[in-house]
Amino acid sequence: MAAARHVGFELTSRQLTLLKRYAAWLESEGYRSSGIGPRELTRLERRHLADSLLFAIGLGGSSDVWDLGTGVGLPGVPLAIALPETRFVLVDRSGRRIDLLRRAIRILDLENCETLLGEIGDLEGPIDSFVARASLPPAEMLETAHRLLAPGGRAVMGGSWKERPRQPGWDTIEIPEDVLDHTVWLLIMRRQ
């Protein structure tokens, strides 16, 4: 997987198997719960799983990462598979999605994952790091980062931007199109 190589991961056969099992779960239960749309089913591995792994670029060896607005576990579950020594907290406001994620975590036997039902605006810090995939606009997520992150903490945000985002307070990292099926950008912030 080009995204894993781009980040510097050497995924084990077990990790690759877990990623495939998660993709199968997304294709069945994730799809039935409307967490993945029908047009996305053909792009699960090369787009959604690969895109999720790229968030590791900005984590800088964090030992504790929260996935804010995780939905069906993207990017948190693929990152938890690739980073088994890191603790992940998957946060979503939908009780139904959290129940689904608990099932996925059991199926995948991910001991480094837990879930939390809650609104992003109600969370309390400090936390080490967080990732977010299109859950809030960058300006709001920057406010969230300042409110939640401990000093030295990191936030990594992705979105479906058609062109390079220019957001005050964020560093922008470009991922070339040969890594995924098109160019993407990640916004990274480190709290001072």
Image: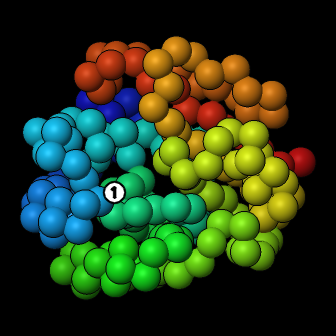
What amino acid type should be assigned to the residue bearing mark 1? Pro
Residue ID at (58%, 43%): 157
Instruction: State whether residue 33 appears in this view.
Output: yes
Q: Is residue 106 left or right of residue 59?
A: left
Residue 24 location in percent, x, y? 10, 60
Q: Is residue 188 above or below residue 162?
A: below
Q: Is residue 102 left or right of residue 57?
A: left
Residue ID at (28%, 47%): 49
Q: Is residue 119 above or below residue 71?
A: below
Name the image quarter holding residue 8.
top left
Residue 107 location in percent, x, y? 19, 80
Q: Secondary structure at mark 1?
A: helix
Instruction: State whether residue 109 appears in this view.
Output: no
Residue ID at (78%, 61%): 149
Q: Nearer the viewer, residue 13 or 92?
A: 92
In the picture of the structure, the residue carrying the numbered disc 1 is 78
Q: Is residue 118 left or right of residue 30?
A: right
